[in-house]
Image (spheres, helix red, strand yellow):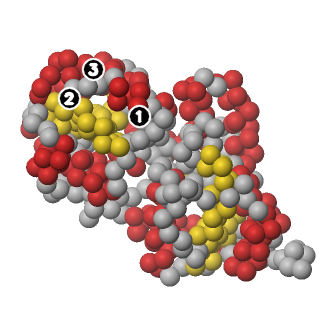
Amino acid sequence: MRIAIFTDTFTPQVNGVAKTLERLTRYLNKKGIRYTLFAPQNVREEHKRTNIQKVKSIPFAVYPECRFAVPNPYFVRRKLLQFQPDLIHVATPFNMGLLGRYYARKLDIPLVGSYHTDFDAYLAYYKMELISPILWNYLRWFHNSLQKTFVPSPATFVQLKDKGFHSLAIWGRGVDCGLFHPDNAENAIRREYGIAAEHILSFAGRLAPEKDIATLQKVMKNINGKMKNHVHWLIAGAGPLYSEFKAKFSEHVTFTGYLPAQKLAQVFAASDLMVFPSATETFGNVVLESLACGTPVIGANAGGVKNILVNHKTGILCTPQRVNEFTSAVSLLLGDHLKRREMSQAARRYALTQSWDQIFEKLLDDYADVVGHSAGSFMSDGLTS
C-alpha cells in the first residue's frame, strides 16, 4: 500500500497532531510501507527526508508558532502522479486537507481523514463563540465527504456522531513504555532544577488559553498557599502565555520550556502528580505518558481525558474549571502516600496495555478496508500531460 498524507502541522512543530503523525511515519518506515507526506515548511527545519514534501508557509495570526500553508498545486500534483498512492489521508481540515481532498476526488483515489482537534471548544477561549455554527457546518461538510474519519477517543466519537458526522472509526493513541517509565532517576531532576520540596507537581502542554491555564494558575496558588515549601511545580511547555504565566509565579515553580520526550519522561517520573485541567482534548497524549511513568493525573472530566483516566484508580477526574475540586484532589493525594502508590501501580499497568504497534496495525487494517471497498483506482484524469 502507498499512502499520501496531507497535514497542516508536522514536526518540528510541537503539538499532539504533529507528534502522532511523526510516530505514524516512523511505524510506516519500520514496516517498509511507502508513504509521502505533504506539510507546511517550518523555519526550524532540522533535516530533510525524501518522503516528506514541505510546501511554503507563513505564520498563522492566532498562533505565530504554527504555519499557514501556501502550497503550489502543480508541485503537489506532480509529486502525487509520481508516487501514485493507493490512499490519501487528510489529517487536518484546512489548507492542506482541502488540497488532499481535491486531488483524491480529481484522481479517483480513496480518501480518509482524521479528527484531532476540538476546534469548537477552543472558540470560547478566544471569545469567538458566534462562529460555532459556521465551524460545525464546515467540519461536517468536510468530514462527511470522506470515506472514513478516524477519531482518537470514544468521547470524540460520540460528540461527532451527535453532530451528524458519519463513517466514523476510532484510531486511538499509544505510548512508548520503554521511554516513558517510572524508573527515571528522581534525584537527577531534583538536582537539575534545585528542588528541595517534599512533593513535585507537574503540568505538561502548550501554554495557551485552550489548555485552561487560568484554572491551573488558581490551583497552583491555592496549593502553594496551603503547602508553601512542601511543594514545587514543574511547568513543561511553551506557547503564547509563557511570559505572562511565568511573571505570576516567583516561588515554588520552575518553567522548563519545551522538553524533548526523554526529559519530559524524567519530569513525569519525578512527579508525585500531574495536574491537567484542559477540557478541550480529543485524546490527551501527555496524560497517557504520565500514567506510563507511574504518575497519577488530576484531570478534567471531559473529552478524551475522561476515557484515559479511571477515577480514583489511575487519577482523579474533576469538573472542568472547578478550581476547588482540582485543589481538593491534589491535597487528598499528596496527603495519602499509600493511595498514590496504588494509583501509580495501576497507572503503569494500564499504560503497558496501550501499544503503538497494535494501534497502527488496526489503522492499516482500516486503510486496507477502505481501499478494498473503493470502486475507483488511481487515474490521471487527463492531468498527466
Image quadrant assignment for residue 106 = bottom right
Quadrant of the rendering where the C terminus is positioned: bottom right
Q: Could you say where residue 115 lies in the image, as x and y percent from the top left? A: 59, 49
Q: Amino acid at mark 3?
A: Lys
- Sequence-wise, which precedes: disc 3 or disc 2? 3
Mark 3 packing: few (<14 Cα in 10 Å), some, or many (20+)? some
**Residue that mark 2 sits on:** 252
Mark 2 or mark 1, earlier in chain: 1
Left or right: where does residue 366 sit relative to residue 155?
Answer: right
**Quadrant hosting residue 65:** top right
Element on which disc 2 rests:
loop
Q: Label 1: how many residues lie within 10 Å, few (<14), some (14-19) or many (20+)?
A: some
The residue shown at (39%, 38%) is: 306
Please name the amino acid that badge 2 sits on.
His
The residue that mark 1 highlights is: 242
User: SS of the residue at dot 3?
Assistant: helix
Tag of residue 359 = none
Mark 2 → mark 1, Cα distance in angstroms: 16 Å
Give the percent coordinates (x, y) of residue 7: 62, 57
Q: Position of residue 57 (x, y in %)?
A: 66, 54
Q: Residue at 41% across / 27% down in the picture?
A: 244
